[in-house]
Amino acid sequence: MRVVVNGASGWLGQSTGHVLSQSKLVLNSNDLLLFGSKDRIAKFGIWEAVPQFSLHKEYRIFGDYDLFVQLSFKTRDYFEILGEEKYVKINRDIIQKSIELLINSKPKYVVLVSSGAVTQYLELNRENPQNTYAKLKLEEEESFIRTCSKLGSELLILRLWSASGADMPNPKKYAIGNLIFQSLYSPQIKVNSPNFIFRRYIDSRNQMEIAIRGCINFGGRILNSGGFLIEIGELALRIRDLLSPTKTILRDQESNLPADSYFSTDTDSADLARILGIPILSINNQIRHTAEAFKI
């Protein structure tokens, strides 16, 4: 299988590399064409040195590809760094360049990783004008839907809510990674939020395999990510018990505050995993796997 991965050097790019090798969808790195923010020689999954090309340079693609995986996007944490105007401009440029790459690739199958923020945004009937990230991800989805329709490509849109895994480039930015870091390197573990926080966690390699193999075997759809539903306090307890059983957990909790619930309620990812025979990591094994991101 010949595969284009756009956004190969990030968290989900590395997870995709592991999926493509371990599932035997790609047997030789010569069948990979990687794109990212700059030219470089990159480690990709099990392959130690694969050329990665800048998305922002002209690159001629020879021949048709079987699979196109779209991961390139400036995530919401860049919004404050760049400011709204620059953030919008950069992401719209990425979308345009990605569409050009998609057209030139002529793939049979396309997996676009979007966000659960889009689902929430649509459920609110687009009434949250402040959610620039969700609006841009929706623009990306709509651009890919139009283009894949013209190309005759099967398009699976994965709306990713929350994930775990060893491929996190900066795990302390995420709740699960931050709690693991504290359990490993701090004298105690502090849960900073006083209100209940509910998330659904799935290992990123599991979720990318579900999306890629699901698209190839069953065609296009919109797929919300799945996983194990857990409140952040229980997550902290599990992390402590697995990694540092003697440490104390601190949390100033106020039960009268509204809960922060950011997770999908559908079971499509779990159903696909069962059909495809993909074993899903338990939450305890997700914690152990994510802790590997802190290996020194």
Image (tube, rainbow, N blue to C red):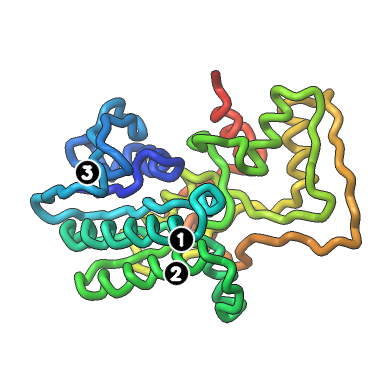
Which is in the foreground here, disc 2 or disc 3? 2
Q: Position of residue 183 (x, y in %)?
A: 73, 28
Q: Residue at the location (57% across, 43% down)?
A: 164
Q: Residue at x 48, y 36 (%)?
A: 167
- Image location of residue 41, percent across then percent down: 26, 29
Q: Position of residue 201 (x, y in %)?
A: 61, 50
Q: Is residue 155 visible?
A: yes
In terms of sequence position, does the residue under pointer 3 or pointer 1 come before the other?
3
Is the residue 218 above or below the residue 94 in the image? Answer: below
Relative image position of residue 106 (x, y in whole percent): 17, 61
Instruction: Give me the residue at 80% from left, 55% from top.
Output: 196
**Label 1 is placed on what type of residue?**
Glu
Q: What separation in Å lies between label 3 and label 1 (alpha carbons)?
A: 31 Å
Which of the two discs, 2 and 1, labels the residue nearer the N terminus? 1
Q: Circle 3 sits in a helix, a strand or a loop, which is it?
A: strand
User: Dot 2 corresponds to which residue?
Assistant: 138
> In front of the other: label 3 or label 1?
1
The foreground one among 156 and 104 is 104
SS state under label 2: helix
Label 1 element class:
helix
- Which label's residue is closer to the chain start, 2 or 3? 3
Q: Residues within 10 Å of mark 1 (few under 14, many from 20)?
A: few
Residue hosting label 1:
85
Number of dots carrying numbers: 3
> In front: mark 2 or mark 1?
1
Quarter of the image that includes the C terminus = top right
Q: Residue at x 90, y 54 (%)?
A: 254
Q: Residues within 10 Å of mark 3 (few under 14, many from 20)?
A: many
In screen coordinates, is 157 left or right of 194?
A: left
Disc 2 to disc 3, C-alpha distance = 26 Å
Name the residue that disc number 3 marks.
Answer: 33
Q: Inspect the image, locate mark 2, and give the three-letter code of the amino acid beneath it.
A: Leu
